[in-house]
Image (cartoon, helix red, strand yellow):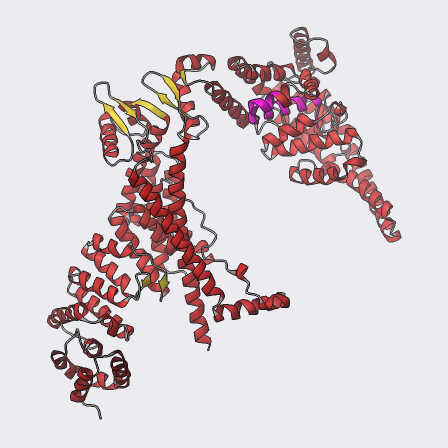
């Protein structure tokens, strides 16, 4: 029978070549029950193993000892040892048992949260994701945990580093929803509104068969960010949105849709009435900060509109048109916008006139050409990806079986050809 | 009561004299202009129409004019007209509105109503029987004729349902070779009205402009030639560009005949074309009150007027690099401040490419830099495409995932 000693010997002996590790993996899987029963005694074994060499064995033992509930004092210790393991372990070994690795990491996250010190988890989690994922296009279950820790620790920048990767492969729809939702919030925190819009848009339009709370909250934020960033919000959904979302989301977001309506009038006073009326609901949803940004974005939007129509306009006229209290206040707004590069203008303080200028960008610089070139390259890459995926899908037996079955009912002659026209998303 | 009637009659006659003796020449003696700057002359107006439209137009005026004597006048004429027809329902309506104000002669005539109702019932039955007989005999031509009779009977009830008019007209046009010119012109008018109702002013204008002189007074149960000129002229003014206005309206010999019937419209179109905007807008202002009493046009007057005014503003600014707002305000008979607001709206909607120098009160044309705009658009389209494709790939993956999951659960 297996004993603790033989187990350690096996782990130490079989951690060299790939075939050895595979053999070890099957041995470990067989001793799953043993791990369960012996979980309390296993912790001491960890000292005999080197996490960078015996990663797989270490992982199994670590998983077993973390499964039992522990006290707060032990938690701190555990966090340390798991963080050490994550940093040292060999990626190719732990990828053999992704479930074990994920569960260890999730417990790690829970402990960090329990200690109310999310900052401690951020760096190890990032390493864990990088080690676990086969390519940067792969969305792991750990992504959302990492983003949550970033949010709680306010490490928005670290969070952004992972959001810059293009994600295409998804294991669990739920991971994807949370990844996009938390990701959206991190982008909002960093005022990267267009990226935030993209992520939230993905949640709202994702295929779903039942409505979930993540989508509802994402939709609310989507409305607000859309107003801040684009100055408008289209009530209608894109046609690929799931029917569940199309039917239900609006019912849950009435105060937000009212806000959209009052924003559409272009009048600050109406917007503020609407904000006042639903103040509690916004606060309850923890969106009050965003709502305030919506209000201040309206001043900007109105001033921006003036730059399209006027060459010169007095500060007093600006204040009157956009409903600011005084010329002084208008000056502050205009100044801020010039500083942020949102408008091009000069202020003549002598006679209180603002002269609006055209966008100085002439699209002649090397940087601009490079930007366009890289954009073209990217789009070519995406097109290739699309073609590749189309090809792959048209060879997928599962898809063919389904498509073929549906086809047969209508037209038997077409059965043998691949109905690529059916490939609509 | 009688005295009051006489008084209004007197007033109308006075007006007639004034209008006739005023600016109109010999031509307008037969086809009097229905629209003038003064209060609408109901009797002359009503004389232009026959049948059901006369009644509904009169009742419409009665409802909208807000002038007691005019209202009663209109109702009286409507009552007389209904008596000639067979519609008892309408009579009841009118009587209710008159409310005894026109004396005992204009009360509910139940005897007449009963007779007419019975006659109508009888005729309906007869037609139905005939139709059934035809059907059993399976004579195709007779069935068609039977339906025609039936159709005539119900025709009156279907008026006002403009959505159907378009489809009927297009159906009828397909067999046009078999139709005589008068019918063709009638169809064009009907289509024009339907399009006007559907707010498709440009298409409506085209239809009215195509209408030929064969129409004459043949379609007065729906539309008078004067209306063709008014509707067509205003719609054209609101929706056509300069070139089209010149070629299809001003130079059109065909439409000129119609315009002669309503000199005001002719004048204001010419004013518009020769850029006498103040005079053109003045004409429009004078006509407005009466146009609002027109059963077909009243809903569209505001929109058409706004479009015409905007067009005038756009045309005025178009040839210039810079425009002095003071002079422009003079030309449009308005103040600089309100002109500035109007221009602001037009620029915001991208209808005028210009910017206002509010300091010096000058409008500067702004020639968009095509090159920069193209670059901007290219970059934007690129990033949109990027985003869309990625989102699509993601969705495809999610669907695939879910599908695979379902499939594996099944096996």
Q: Is residue A79 above or below residue A260?
A: below
Can residue B99 be seen? no
Pinpoint residue A365: horizontal percent, then vertical percent: 30, 37
Q: Is residue B236 left or right of residue A237?
A: right
Furthest-bottom residue in view? A1
Q: How many marks?
A: 0
> Residue sitting at 44 percent across and 12 percent down?
B330
Predominant secondary structure in magenta? Answer: helix
- Residue at screen point 22% across, 53% down: A156
Magenta stretch encompasses residue B386: no
Q: Quadrant of residue A14?
A: bottom left
Residue A341 horizontal/vertical position (percent): 26, 35
Which quadrant of the figure has residue B148?
top right
Q: Residue B42: image x %, image y %? A: 67, 19
Region in magenta: B223-246
Q: Residue furthest top?
A: B21
In this rendering, position of residue A53 left or right of residue B155: left
Q: Quadrant of the N terminus of chain A?
A: bottom left
Horizontal side of B270 relative to B310 (left or right) equals right
């Amino acid at each position: 029978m297996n004993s603790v000693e033989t187990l350690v010997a096996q782990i130490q002996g079989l951690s060299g070549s790939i075939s050895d590790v595979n053999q070890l993996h099957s041995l470990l899987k067989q001793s799953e029950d043993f791990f369960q029963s012996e979980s309390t005694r296993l912790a001491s074994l960890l000292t005999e193993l080197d996490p960078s060499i015996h990663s797989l064995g270490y992982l199994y033992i670590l998983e077993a000892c973390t499964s039992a509930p522990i006290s707060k004092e032990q938690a701190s210790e555990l966090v340390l040892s798991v963080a050490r393991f994550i940093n040292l372990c060999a990626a190719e070994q732990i990828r053999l048992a992704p479930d074990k690795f994920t569960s260890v990491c999730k417990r790690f996250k829970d402990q960090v949260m329990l200690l109310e010190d999310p900052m401690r988890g951020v760096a190890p989690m990032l390493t864990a994701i990088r080690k676990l994922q086969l390519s940067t296009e792969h969305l792991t279950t750990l992504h959302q945990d990492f983003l949550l820790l970033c949010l709680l620790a306010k490490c928005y920048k670290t969070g952004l580093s992972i959001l810059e990767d293009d994600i295409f492969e998804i294991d669990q729809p739920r991971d994807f929803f949370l990844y996009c939702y938390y990701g959206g919030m991190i982008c909002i925190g960093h005022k990267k509104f267009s990226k935030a819009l993209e992520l939230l848009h993905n949640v709202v339009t994702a295929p779903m068969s039942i409505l979930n709370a993540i989508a509802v909250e994402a939709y609310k934020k989507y409305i607000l960010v859309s107003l801040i960033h684009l100055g408008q919000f289209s009530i209608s959904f894109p046609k690929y949105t799931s029917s569940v979302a199309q039917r239900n989301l609006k019912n849950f977001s009435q105060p937000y849709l009212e806000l959209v309506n009052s924003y559409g009038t272009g009048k600050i006073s109406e917007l503020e009435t609407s904000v006042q009326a639903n103040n509690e609901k916004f606060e309850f949803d923890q969106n009050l900060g965003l709502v305030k940004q919506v209000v201040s974005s309206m001043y900007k939007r109105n001033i921006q509109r003036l730059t399209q129509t006027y060459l010169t306009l007095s500060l007093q006229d600006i204040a009157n048109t956009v409903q600011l209290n005084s010329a002084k206040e208008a000056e502050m707004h205009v100044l801020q916008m010039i500083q942020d590069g949102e408008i091009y203008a000069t202020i003549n303080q002598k006679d209180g006139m603002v002269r609006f200028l055209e966008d100085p960008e002439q699209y002649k610089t090397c940087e601009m050409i490079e930007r366009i070139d890289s954009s073209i390259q990217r789009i070519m890459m995406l097109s290739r990806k699309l073609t590749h995926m189309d090809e792959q899908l048209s060879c997928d037996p599962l898809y063919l079986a389904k498509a073929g079955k549906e086809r047969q009912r209508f037209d038997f002659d077409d059965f043998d050809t691949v109905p690529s026209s059916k490939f609509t998303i | 009561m009688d005295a009051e009637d006489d008084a209004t009659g007197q007033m109308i006659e006075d007006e007639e004299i004034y209008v006739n003796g005023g600016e109109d020449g010999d031509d307008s003696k037969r086809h009097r202009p229905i629209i003038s700057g003064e209060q609408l002359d109901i009797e002359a107006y009503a004389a232009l129409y026959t049948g059901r439209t006369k009644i509904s137009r009169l009742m419409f005026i009665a409802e909208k004019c807000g002038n007691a004597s005019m209202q009663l006048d209109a109702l009286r004429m409507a009552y007389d007209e209904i008596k000639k027809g067979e519609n008892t329902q309408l009579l009841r309506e009118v009587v209710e509105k008159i409310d005894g104000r026109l004396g005992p002669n204009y009360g509910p005539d139940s005897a007449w109503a009963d007779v007419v109702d019975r006659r109508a019932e009888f005729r309906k039955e007869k037609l139905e029987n005939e139709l059934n007989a035809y059907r059993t005999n399976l004579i195709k031509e007779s069935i068609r004729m039977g339906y025609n009779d039936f159709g005539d009977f119900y025709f009156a009830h279907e008026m006002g349902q403009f959505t159907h008019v378009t489809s009927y007209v297009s159906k009828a046009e397909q067999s046009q070779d078999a139709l005589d010119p008068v019918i063709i012109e009638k169809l064009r008018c009907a289509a024009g009205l339907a399009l006007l109702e559907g707010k498709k002013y440009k298409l409506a204008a085209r239809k009215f402009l195509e209408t030929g002189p064969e129409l004459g007074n043949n379609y007065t149960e729906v539309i008078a030639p004067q209306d063709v000129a008014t509707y067509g002229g205003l719609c054209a003014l609101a929706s056509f560009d300069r070139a089209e206005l010149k070629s299809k309206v001003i130079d059109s010999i065909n439409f000129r005949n119609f315009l002669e019937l309503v000199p005001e419209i002719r004048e204001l179109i010419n004013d518009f074309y020769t850029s006498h905007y103040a005079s053109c807008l003045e004409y429009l202002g004078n006509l407005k009150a009466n146009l609002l009493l027109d059963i077909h046009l009243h809903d569209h007057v505001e929109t058409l007027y706004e479009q015409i005014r905007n067009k005038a503003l756009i045309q005025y600014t178009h040839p210039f690099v810079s425009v002095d707002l003071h002079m422009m305000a003079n030309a449009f008979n308005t103040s600089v401040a309100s002109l500035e607001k109007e221009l602001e709206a037009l620029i915001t909607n991208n209808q005028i490419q210009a910017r206002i120098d509010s300091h010096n009160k000058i409008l500067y044309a702004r020639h968009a830099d095509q090159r920069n705009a193209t670059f901007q658009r290219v970059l934007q389209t690129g990033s949109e495409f990027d985003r869309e494709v990625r989102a699509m790939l993601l969705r495809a993956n999610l669907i695939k995932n879910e599908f695979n999951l379902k499939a594996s659960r099944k096996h």
